[in-house]
């Protein structure tokens, strides 16, 4: 045995970090906010509306805009002031509290939906008045912008509407496609609320509200999918699925994720949980009924996200005794289990109250939803000579149900007792590839990475070895790990509390929030002696 190998064996140690049971508020997973930045922190500068203190902390906000909210009634160009006041400000505010944004663009309001936006004509159906005039000859010069049922149903087939939609999306893409706060686009534009159906407008003679029930073929709708691909080539995309239509499988084959509405619908008779979702999922791979079957549909979650939106207004509605569509506790459990089996990442629970009876169930659900990375074991040589190597063998596990969809490089750092960072070392591991088990009956894969880093120009002494999953091209740790360790100083005191006052400008609240989160997501592992 060589003297070097013997030295490594004598000075190396194996660490087993304690696992954490905390809910982790990480990018792109968990419950989302709906049309607001913060719902459970009344003291937060971006808090809005009434407090919902029972709602969990969130990493993602979900916003929707109609076409007529982004342009004036008589000008085809998108309005700069409207874009700044609405989309730009949401992206800016979300980024300032370390949140990502999902956006849907829409062209048709629900029939009779109230209009609160002062920029919008009170008789508008979702598209601006100038486009109504262009398509149907009314909407300007004192005439109504409102669409008749027939106009609304047939609008999405009209070549001029398709052309204008392509222009609309292209302009938005040029402005927002590279925005790092934009987590993904929920592909809307088609149908009522951009949800690929014609609810409220479909004719009495149609079999249902689906696009295919109202004469649409997949060829009619492909242009909208292709337009969003062209407009937002760098932004991940999800698209609504229904139990009819081939357009979702067309989209998933092009890299889209998928989402569905009405999670938790257990109504008597036909319902989404027992009828709608199983039929939709089956149709996606059925070559006998689907013109664009996606034979890999059930594996797409490994590369693209799966999201859900709850049925009814809130989980409080699920619980309410007065509600005729109230869910039993077992139905709530089965609802969450279904989402986990589909490898979901985000749930739009509509920023609404969580009943006390569901709190533990929600916690258990959120601790599985999306990705959840554990560092199970680390072997490291605790004594390193100058100009020699620090060897780190680490063992990881994704105990969630989905991967992360963007790499946050595993980064190690050496920190002195006074809080100075003396070195960073970035692993070549790509955590996008760290998948969970395919299903609950299979053990999670274990991922082992071996790193070695040369110690150069570091003074003799003791250093803390920390680990973080950092934003690419930065030193900012963005992903909280499911291990129960924290940063300390040489006296064993909490590093976050003791060190931040020295290092950060307390008057800059936005920077303070950013730095607090950055510090808190680093995890201390062991002490390294450099001799």
Image (tube, rainbow, N blue to C red):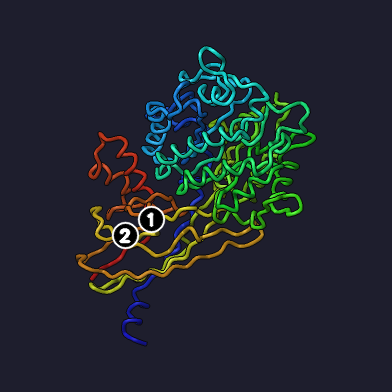
Residue in view at x 56 percent, y 32 percent: 161
Residue situated in front as seen by the camera: 127 or 120: 127
Q: Secondary structure at mark 1?
A: strand
Observer able to see residue 523: yes
Q: Position of residue 347 (x, y in %)?
A: 57, 40
Are the residues tagged 1 and 2 within 8 Å (C-beta)? yes
Res. 8 image quadrant: bottom left
Q: Which residue is mark 1?
A: 468
Task: Give the quadrant of the N terminus.
Answer: bottom left
Q: Position of residue 339 (x, y in %)?
A: 63, 46
Q: Which numbered dot is residue 297?
A: none
Residue in view at x 37 percent, y 26 percent: 81
Q: Position of residue 193 (x, y in %)?
A: 59, 31
Q: Which residue is most to the bottom?
A: 1
Q: Which residue is mark 2?
A: 413
Q: Position of residue 40 (x, y in %)?
A: 47, 31
Q: Secondary structure at mark 2?
A: strand
Viewed as shown, does residue 457 lie left or right of 453? left
Task: Give the quadrant of the C terminus.
Answer: bottom left
Res. 507 image quadrant: top left
Res. 330 image quadrant: top right
**Badge 1 local density, few (<14 within 10 Å), some, or many (20+)?**
many
**Badge 2 local density, few (<14 within 10 Å), some, or many (20+)?**
many
Q: Earlier in the sequence, mark 1 or mark 2?
A: 2
């Amino acid at each position: 045995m060589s003297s070097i190998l013997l030295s490594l064996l004598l000075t190396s140690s194996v660490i087993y970090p304690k696992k954490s049971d905390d809910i982790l508020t990480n990018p792109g997973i968990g419950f989302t906010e709906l049309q607001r930045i913060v719902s459970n922190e009344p003291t937060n500068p971006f808090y809005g509306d009434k407090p919902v203190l029972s709602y969990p902390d969130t990493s993602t906000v979900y916003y929707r805009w109609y076409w007529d909210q982004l342009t004036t009634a008589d000008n085809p160009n998108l309005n700069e002031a409207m874009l700044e006041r609405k989309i730009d400000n949401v992206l800016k505010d979300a980024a300032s509290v370390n949140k990502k944004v999902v956006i849907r663009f829409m062209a048709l309001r629900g029939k009779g939906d109230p209009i609160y936006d002062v920029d919008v004509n009170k008789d508008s159906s979702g598209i601006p008045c100038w486009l109504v005039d262009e398509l149907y000859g009314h909407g300007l010069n004192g005439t109504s912008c409102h669409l008749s049922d027939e106009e609304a149903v047939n609008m999405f087939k009209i070549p001029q509407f398709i052309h204008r939609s392509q222009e609309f999306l292209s302009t938005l893409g040029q402005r927002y496609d590279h925005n790092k706060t934009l987590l993904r686009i929920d592909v809307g534009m088609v149908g009522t609320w951009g949800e690929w159906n014609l609810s409220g407008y479909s004719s009495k003679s149609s079999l249902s509200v689906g696009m295919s029930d109202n004469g649409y073929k997949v060829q009619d709708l492909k242009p909208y999918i292709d337009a969003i691909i062209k407009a937002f080539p760098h932004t991940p995309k999800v698209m609504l699925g229904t139990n009819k239509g081939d357009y979702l499988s067309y989209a998933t084959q092009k890299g889209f994720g998928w989402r569905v509405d009405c999670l938790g619908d257990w109504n008597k008779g036909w319902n989404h949980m027992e009828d709608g979702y199983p039929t939709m999922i089956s149709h996606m791979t059925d070559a006998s009924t689907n013109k664009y079957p996606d034979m890999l549909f059930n594996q797409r979650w490994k590369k693209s996200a799966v999201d859900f939106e709850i049925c009814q207004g809130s989980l409080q509605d699920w619980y309410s005794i007065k509600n005729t569509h109230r869910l039993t506790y077992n139905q709530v459990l089965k609802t969450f289990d279904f989402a986990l089996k589909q490898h979901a990442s985000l749930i739009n629970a509509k920023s609404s109250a969580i009943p006390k009876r569901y709190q533990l169930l929600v916690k258990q659900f959120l601790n599985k939803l999306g990705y959840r990375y554990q560092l199970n074991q680390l072997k490291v040589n605790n004594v390193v000579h100058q100009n020699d190597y620090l060897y780190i063998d680490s063992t990881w596990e994704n105990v969630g149900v989905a991967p992360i969809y963007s790499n946050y490089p595993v980064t190690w750092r050496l920190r002195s007792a006074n809080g100075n960072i003396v070195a960073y070392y970035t692993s070549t591991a790509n955590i996008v590839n760290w998948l969970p088990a395919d299903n609950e009956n299979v053990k999670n894969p274990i991922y082992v990475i071996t790193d070695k880093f040369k110690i150069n120009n570091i003074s003799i002494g003791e250093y803390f070895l920390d680990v973080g999953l950092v934003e690419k091209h930065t030193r900012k740790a963005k992903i909280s790990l499911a291990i129960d360790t924290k940063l300390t100083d040489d006296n064993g005191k909490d590093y976050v509390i003791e060190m931040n006052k020295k290092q950060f400008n307390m008057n800059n609240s936005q920077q303070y929030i950013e730095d607090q989160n950055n510090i808190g997501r680093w995890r201390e592992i062991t002490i390294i002696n450099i001799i």
